[in-house]
Amino acid sequence: MGQCTLVNLVQLKVRDLKNNTKFLLLSFILAFIFVDVGINIYFAWFSSSEDMSDIPKLNSGCINVLEESYLHPWFGPLGVQGNTCDTEFNNRYGLKSKDYPKENSPDKFNILLVGGSVADLFYMHNYQREPELTSGLEIELNKRYKSKSGEKISVFNAAKRDFRQPQALHFLIEEMHKYDLIISLEGYNETWAIREKRIIPNPPVEYKVLFLKEELEGLVKNKRIIENTFLKHLGFGKLYFRFLNREIKTKFYEPLVYEKISIESEKAAMEKYINYQRALSSLCREFKKSCVTFFQPHPGIQKKLSENEKKVVQLDNKNFINSKLYEKVVTHQINSKLVGLTKISLLNLFDNIEDDVYIDHIHLNYRGNEIMTNKIIEELAKLNLIVRK
């Protein structure tokens, strides 16, 4: 009888334990759902405006670009034809241009454009896609002009977002012999480096994937796993996905070790910029090439901004280069005369132009690039580098 009572007692305890376990499990599931729904509500109501659009795209094509790159990573390519990182128009060097000539052709007058994103967009302005990517500058030049020897003019691009001197200088060491005229459209990115007192220019952001490959691959792998499953739509999954995005973004945008090395003063940084120009002029003389540097316009200098332009250029934004420093840098450059290199300021390019020409703090719309195209052609004609047909 006592044994039977003991057995019953054990059975009751087991049943209670099962019931408690079910209750605890059910409580845990309900708590998870409650917290998960709460996280989703938080994202829906409070975090929907968070902008994660500037997180670099990290697909396998980008990560493996080094295998098909031709130039030193600081000075040239970021992507190759066929990958999915905004490279629809890229040539084999990873730059938006038709493929570079193997040698200087005697029946063509080859022009190479170098610079940063302003120059890159300028090259793409009014481009002709077929039969090959052709710059709007080349199209306009060939409508009205030819070289002094009568050759057809062909324009190639070696500009890229974030590029600045001395990146163009190093590129030209490799490529200058193939061209008859070098046009550099620059100033803003170099002034940025002067403000930050940097010794070495930072590489374009996308390229950091090659420096940080091992650190990023695990984060990117986890991000892809979540991105392609239902986990991304759960509150906890969404929270982890945001965490991974922030980690990737932080690693991309924090300075690399060498980027933290600085020059002791703004004056010294400005002199270093002059030294880059001296080196470029020496290179032009050595290769017996014509070289022209155009200093791009700034929205805060000699342009009556429309109400719309005032909103997009953000002249009071301290993250951007102010007009006072930019004008100081350009004036310093123009006053430094160098044999073999012609310097031309475009600061007054939009004087008396009432049309909207700026799309943000420095880049130009179609109309702005059209005006700059005509001005550059006009200056090249004044220098007797091209002649009327």
Image (tube, rainbow, N blue to C red):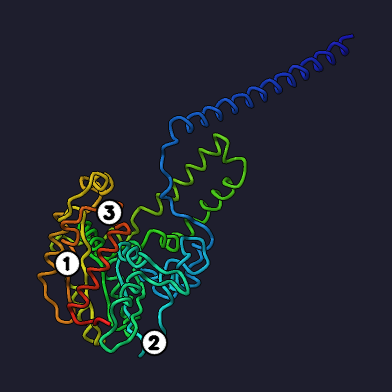
- Distance, label 3 to label 2, CA atoms, is 37 Å
| Camera-side residue of 150 and 33 | 150
- 43 left or right, relative to 308: right
Q: Earlier in the sequence, mark 1 or mark 2?
A: 2
**Image quadrant containing the C terminus:** bottom left
- 125 left or right, relative to 199: right
Q: Residue at x 23, y 57 (%)?
A: 196
Residue 41 in the image: state x and y as whole percent: 50, 29
Residue 243 in the image: state x and y as whole percent: 47, 42
Amino acid carrying mark 2 in the image: Glu
Question: Residue 358, labelled with which disc?
Answer: 3
Q: Earlier in the sequence, mark 3 or mark 2?
A: 2
Q: Secondary structure at mark 2?
A: loop
Q: Are marks 1 and 2 in contact (CB under 8 Å)?
A: no
- Distance, label 3 to label 1, CA atoms, is 18 Å
Mark 3 or mark 2, which is nearer to you?
Answer: 3
Q: Which residue is mark 2?
A: 103
Residue 328 in the image: state x and y as whole percent: 12, 60
Question: Residue 345, labelled with which disc?
Answer: 1
Q: Secondary structure at mark 1?
A: strand
Amino acid carrying mark 3 in the image: Tyr
| Camera-side residue of 259 and 322 | 322
